[in-house]
């Protein structure tokens, strides 16, 4: 274990990263206290159901995948996906994000959970604190809301650093986990390299490509709709990386600098949303819309692409400058549209085949809503972004420009999600329903045969 790291970074980044598998058991220890507690009807039903399942089937399988992102937040972020399974069914799904505090021990846990095998029932989101101590060997999760009451969790890393024993308790019940690492373990050299390179300034598009791929893979794993645009962004950035040296740009370094500044605005919006911070006004309605589970794959692509161009592009242009005067890079800006034209059909085809191949043709029924995915639509939106960047450079129009940029994203969301024609609304709702039912999430099946083989024998 790395000894030069704060406790919480040692626990999540040095020991915890990787895949884990083990056994989970649930025990209702005090029935009178359970009946006295005001947990609500459905929590009682779920609790009794867990007791029955435990009695009939014995201990359950628990599987976990934890990833480290030292460059996120103030002191790094770790993400975790936990599944409790039996007979091929996921009985409990937990998606967590651990926001580490600069003090070296405390963190805030953001999580989504689902109890039961039915995907759209008994879902909730929650936040609670945690603390890592004993030089990264022990974790305490405080005030964890579960089944209508608060729990405390204690996780102890064993001496070999490949096993963890855990116990969760509340006033009337307890759970036990015994998990072991399987697969390749993250070592100290990996973390040191990541820690050294992550805070470094992004100087080329390969850094952006790597970050987009990390975000895309995580969103695929947790079934987050932001994966759709992130994958599209990854695709077009790879195309730009290949095409910039081939195009006759007056200043290719300016084009790269603009792409980097442009991407940074997207990363900032993603991190702010995940860490519970203030989300940029142009992104807030988009994230709320696509996280609501009522949009199709194509709508999610269009909404995010519109927000990125309408909101982020003028800000990025203002950051890199040279939008006015004799040194203006307007020619290079319009030449970049040719690269986008090369990639737009590839983006749309890749996204729909990756996330919704069955209903690819139904997504096209969105009609006018995918106009931003056309060459004309992108050129028009980028021209408006350049105009707004020029307004940002003028002190007298800067305030009005910022308000207009923020307002435009909300208008786009309203126009796409609430079409004026009633007949079109009915068709769109049917498309969304079928899109949700047939959506796929590539790369999310982390519970492989090797994981099942690593499970300890149940008693």
Image (cartoon, rainbow, N blue to C red):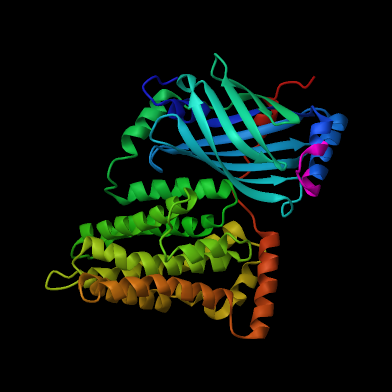
Compared with 41, 228 (above or below) is: below
Residue 34, image x, y percentages: 80, 35
For the point 74% across and 53% down, the residue is: 121
Quadrant where the N terminus lies? top left
Residue 64, image x, y percentages: 62, 34
Compared with 360, 400 (above or below) is: below
For the point 61% across and 66% down, the residue is: 296
The magenta stretch spans which residues? Answer: 35-43
Compared with 174, 161 (above or below) is: above
Quadrant where the C terminus lies? top right
Q: Does residue 240 show up magenta in the picture?
A: no
Q: Does residue 36 show up magenta in the picture?
A: yes
Determine whether, in the image, residue 398 is placed left or right of residue 441.
Answer: left
Residue 204, image x, y percentages: 29, 49
Determine whether, in the image, residue 82 is placed left or right of residue 351.
Answer: right
For the point 52% across and 55% down, the residue is: 227
Residue 25, located in which quarter of the rendered image?
Answer: top right
Residue 89, image x, y percentages: 77, 41
Q: Pick whichever, 17 or 5, lies toward us.
A: 5
Numbered circles on residues, count:
0
For the point 66% across and 66% down, the residue is: 359
Instruction: Inspect this view and state whether residue 260 appears.
Output: yes
């Amino acid at each position: 274990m790395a000894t030069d790291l704060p406790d919480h970074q040692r626990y999540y980044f040095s020991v915890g990263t990787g895949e884990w598998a083990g056994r989970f058991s649930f025990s209702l220890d005090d029935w009178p206290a359970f009946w006295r507690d005001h947990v609500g009807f459905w929590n009682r039903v779920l609790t009794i159901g867990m007791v029955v399942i435990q009695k009939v089937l014995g201990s359950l399988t628990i599987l976990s995948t934890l990833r480290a992102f030292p460059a996120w937040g103030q002191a790094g972020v770790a993400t975790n996906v936990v599944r409790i399974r039996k007979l091929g069914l996921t009985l409990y799904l937990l998606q967590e994000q651990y926001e580490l505090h600069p003090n070296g021990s405390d963190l805030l846990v953001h999580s989504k959970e689902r109890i039961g095998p039915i995907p759209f029932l008994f879902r909730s989101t929650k936040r609670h604190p945690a603390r890592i101590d004993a030089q990264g060997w022990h974790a305490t999760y405080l005030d964890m809301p579960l089944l209508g009451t608060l729990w405390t969790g204690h996780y102890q890393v064993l001496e070999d650093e490949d096993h963890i024993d855990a116990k969760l308790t509340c006033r009337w019940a307890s759970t036990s986990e015994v998990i072991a690492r399987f697969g390749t373990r993250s070592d100290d050299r990996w973390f040191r390299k990541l820690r050294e390179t992550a805070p470094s300034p992004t100087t080329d598009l390969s850094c952006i490509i790597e970050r987009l791929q990390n975000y895309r893979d995580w969103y695929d794993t947790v079934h987050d709709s932001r994966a759709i645009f992130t994958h599209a962004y990854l695709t077009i950035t790879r195309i730009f990386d290949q095409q910039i040296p081939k195009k006759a740009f007056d200043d290719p370094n300016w084009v790269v600098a603009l792409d980097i500044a442009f991407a940074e605005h997207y990363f900032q919006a993603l991190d702010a949303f995940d860490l519970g911070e203030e989300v940029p006004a142009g992104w807030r309605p988009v994230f709320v819309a696509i996280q609501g589970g009522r949009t199709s794959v194509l709508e999610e692509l269009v909404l995010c692409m519109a927000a990125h161009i309408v909101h982020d592009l003028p800000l990025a242009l203002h950051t890199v400058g040279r939008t006015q005067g004799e040194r203006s890079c307007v020619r290079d800006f319009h030449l970049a549209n040719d690269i986008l034209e090369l990639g737009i059909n590839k983006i749309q085809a890749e996204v729909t085949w990756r996330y919704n191949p069955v209903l690819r043709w139904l997504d096209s029924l969105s009609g006018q809503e995918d106009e931003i995915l056309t060459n004309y639509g992108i050129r028009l939106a980028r021209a408006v972004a350049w105009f707004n960047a020029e307004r940002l450079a003028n002190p007298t129009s800067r305030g009005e420009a910022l308000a207009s940029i923020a307002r435009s994203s909300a208008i786009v969301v309203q126009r796409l999600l609430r079409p004026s024609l009633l007949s079109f609304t009915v068709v769109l709702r049917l498309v969304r329903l079928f899109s949700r039912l047939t959506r796929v999430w590539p790369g999310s099946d982390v519970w492989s045969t090797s994981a099942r083989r690593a499970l300890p024998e149940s008693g």
